[in-house]
Amino acid sequence: MTEQRTIRGLRQITTSEPAVEGAGVHLRRAFGFRDPALFDPFLLLDDFRSDTPEDYLAGFPWHPHRGIETITYVLDGEVEHQDSLGNGGVITPGDVQWMTAGGGILHQEMPQGNPRGRMAGFQLWANLPAARKLMQPRYRDVASDTIPQVTTTDGATIRVIAGTVGGVQGPVRDVITDPAYLDVSLPAGTRFDHEVTAGHTVFAYVIDGAGQFQPEASQPEGSQSESGQPGSAGPPDEATNGTLLLYDDGDAIRVQTETRAVRFLLVSGKPLGEPIAWSGPVVMNTQDELRLAFEELDRGTFIKHDD
């Protein structure tokens, strides 16, 4: 007997909203700050795509982070960065920077558009568990040419940043929350089924085109509705650029395209289930820990890593 998979339904559908961060960077926020438990272990996703240099050139001057990981994925333009560890460099198109702030780091990120003034990228924040909040800061600089690309039998093309697709593992490994971070492109007229880990938080963020992210109602794969057809509801509206889709639990997701292709980020991770005390770039577990972090920042004792 073939084991059934449960295709995940959608828990929430929202649209990214305008926000201003750093020294005046205009971006769109997919989620962040309102209900941190909802996307656990993820905290925030920002979309900084723009064709207007005035929207992004002010950048993100020196600022602190503690207790989290920040994941920057650049599609177009470049991001120059420096930090209190003495690191510096440029994140170019297709590159990823996976920074673990741990016990504390100061850094800056300054976007630079391409010759046409185009800047495109995303920053995701992932929480660290209490036992690793003050771990040694570290970087995983992931060059574009080290990120494998997989073409599936569904017709999907997937850049595997973290996680595994078809036996191909992404370059970002050994992360506490067991994340998957995929850049998925589907041609028109495609049905894409993708297995995910039951119990993990899973969301998709559409960055181009249109697709149906719940083409059938959530139910065990292979079951039928009263009409004798798979599923129990008609297809919903297509999700387009800037749509965020948070999934319910289950073993797999299904995405379908009709007349248009779609491209989306697909992210999953193991929830921490811990209390969150959060203020700006610092995320701890208690208000006392949060207060101490900002006191140390004021005293100049924020940086905890070894010399």
Image (cartoon, rainbow, N blue to C red):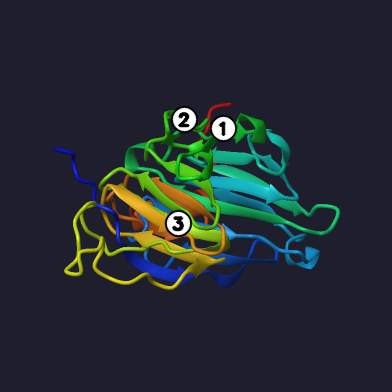
Q: Secondary structure at mark 3?
A: strand
From the top left corner, tell me how far across and down residue 111 is, in percent.
Answer: 73, 53
Question: Is there a contact, CB below 8 Å, between mark 2 and mark 1?
Answer: yes
**Quadrant assignment for the N terminus:** top left
Which amino acid, by three-letter code, is at mark 2? Gln
Q: Which residue is mark 3?
A: 204
Q: Quadrant of residue 88?
A: top right
Label whose residue precedes the other's in the sequence (2 or 1)? 1
Residue 87 picture location, percent across and down: 68, 34
Q: Mark 2: few, some, or many residues within 10 Å (few <14, many ≥20)?
A: some
Which element type, helix, strand or loop, lies under badge 2?
strand
The residue carrying mark 1 is: 148
Which residue is label 2 attached to?
169
- Residue 283 at what x, y percent from top left? 43, 53
CA gap between label 3 and label 2 equals 19 Å
Q: Residue at x 43, y 36 (%)?
A: 163
Residue 79, compared with residue 224, is above or below; it is above
- The quarter holding residue 105 reads top right
Q: Left or right of 265: which side holds 88?
A: right
Answer few, some or many: residues within 10 Å of disc 3's Cα (few below 14, many 20 plus, some between 14 and 19): many
Left or right position of 1 against 104: left
Q: Residue at x 64, y 38 (%)?
A: 84
Residue at 32 percent across and 48 percent down: it is 252
Local secondary structure at mark 1: loop
